[in-house]
Amino acid sequence: MKTLLLLLPVLTPIGLGCLWRFRKLKGKAMNAAFVGTVLLSAVLAAACALVPQMDAISLKWTDVLTLSLRVDGVSKVYLLLLAVTWPGAALYATEYLEHDQDPSGFYLFYTVTQGVLHGLAMSGNLVTFYMFYEAMTLLTVPLVLHNRDKEAVAASIKYLVYSVIGASAALIGIFFVGSVGGTGDFAAGVLTAEQLAGKENLAMAIFMVMLVGFGVKAGMFPMHGWLPTAHPVAPAPASAVLSGVITKMGVLGVIRVLYSIAGVERLRGTWVQMALLALTLLTILMGSLLALKEKKLKKRLAYSSVSQVSYVLFGLFTMTEWGFVGAILHVIFHSLMKNTLFMGAGNIIHKTEKTYVQEMDGLGRRMPWTYAFFTVASLGLVGIPPTGGFISKWNLAQGALATGFSYSWIGPAVLLISAVLTASYLFTLVIRGCFPGEDHKPEPSCEAGVRMLLPMAVYALLIVGLGVFSGGLISYLETLAQTLL
């Protein structure tokens, strides 16, 4: 029974999503079927995360090619994160796409992607992970392409090209792991010294290529360009999950390679670690500066994602317990915060058709709930207590100092500078919206509907609630870090 439970989160959204498309449901029936499917699938994913002692599923084709599904500590975090974030954006989409000519196409790819993401989270080896990873890319391209205009076509092509390049870099690593006798199984432990004997330098280069390859999906420099191109043209619910969830799957690839294949003991203190730390810090600073400069609302948030997801990568690349805890905390909190911010941007664009920062004057008075939730997410992204962003960034700074490097202070310094820049480019939106000046003429309310506000309200509550009551979550992550390091 528990073995079957592993398959249900993968197959249920794929099967039902295709069924509703085949039945050509429309209107309220389509909305109900869509949200119901996503919620059911989320419950199944949460069950996989919470049921103890799950059995693994393996389908062996050859000694190297084996498909495997299993649930470990990292899988549980991702499954629960998907169970919270994916249904919220689905409910949001039913109102946002209310007047869309063909929302069923969006719904199909959204639900099928959910099943693939569950498979990705539960992948037990590199081969399985790669198959779901590529499927995720192919299925999310139509989400970016949904509007089908010239800009959307160009953005989707760019997203696809960048993703394929990153996945190809990871594939090189899979071939290398197989060539030295490794199975790529995440539970089997890292590659041994005997397997890499005589190939140590090559192995270092391959691990670097793999980590940068998965870093493409996470928006790490120099392959970050797809994010600010794809996000502004995609529908708001797609932008929310692209930033809040899809980028974190690149992070998951980094976790699997770093902690289950290469091994932190092998990479700690090497040129690989130094190069990766430098790339992440550069991305953090660059993304924040570009966000501050950007005048288009959704593009500003996209550059923010470039910066903030590299916070996560930086924590992982410190290869310390505090760094790992801070990284996973930021995976969770950034997902909640960026979902909220992109939904807020979607509310503004959907109701007012205003897309630029300078057009936001007075919107806080016309859309009070949208701006309230947007403000909570902004406080969290800056890292102001008692939000969860403060907890994650505090642990990231501690992780940087725990590396013991003589220049370990550079990491916290860059994080602090980035926080100031984040406050500048986010609080500008809040201030312009809520305090437009005495000469601003009042305009009628244009607040979004309940289906667009409810997910934002839940996420805002979690941003603060998990920040205040974070003890249990941190304890779990500390235990998980000790098993990986």
Image (tube, grey):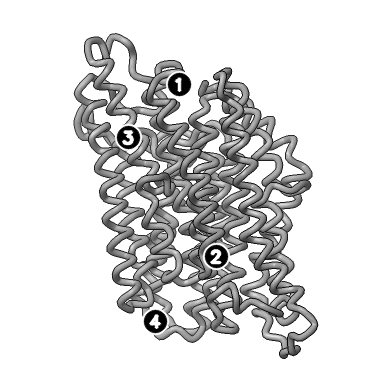
The answer to whether residue 368 of the structure is visible from this angle is yes
Examine the image and state in which quarter residue 76 appears: top right
Q: Which mark is residue 264?
A: 1
Residue 153 position, x and y percent, is 30, 71
Give how far apart the Cα atoms at labels 1 and 3 are.
Answer: 14 Å
Q: Is residue 450 left or right of residue 266?
A: right
Instruction: Indicate the amino acid at tag 1.
Output: Val
What mark, if any, has residue 89 been given in the picture? 2
Of labels 1 and 2, earlier in sequence is 2
CA neighbours of label 4 inside 10 A, class few (<14), some (14 to 19), many (20+)? few
Q: What whole-number distance in Å separates the C-alpha atoms at marks 1 and 2?
A: 36 Å
Q: What amino acid does circle 2 point to? A: Ala
Q: Residue at x 53, y 58 (%)?
A: 291
Where disc 2 sits, the SS reads: helix
Dot 1 surroundings within 10 Å: few (below 14), some, or many (20 or more)?
A: many
Identify the residue under disc 3: 210
Which secondary structure, mark 1? helix
**First-in-chain label (3 vs 2):** 2
The residue mark sitting in front, 1 or 2, is 1
Residue at 41% x, 20% y is 267
Q: Earlier in the sequence, mark 4 or mark 3?
A: 4
- Which of marks 2 and 4 precedes in the sequence? 2
3 vs 2, front mark: 3
- Residue 283, percent from left and from top: 47, 44
* In front of the other: 394 or 441: 441
Q: Which residue is mark 4?
A: 102
Look at the numbered disc 3 and give the secondary structure of its residue. Answer: helix
Check contact, mark 4 vs mark 2: CB within 8 A: no
Q: Residue at x 29, y 37 (%)?
A: 127
Task: Report the side of 49 relative to 210 (left or right).
Answer: right
Q: Earlier in the sequence, mark 1 or mark 4?
A: 4
The Cα–Cα distance between marks 1 and 4, rounded to whole angstroms, is 48 Å
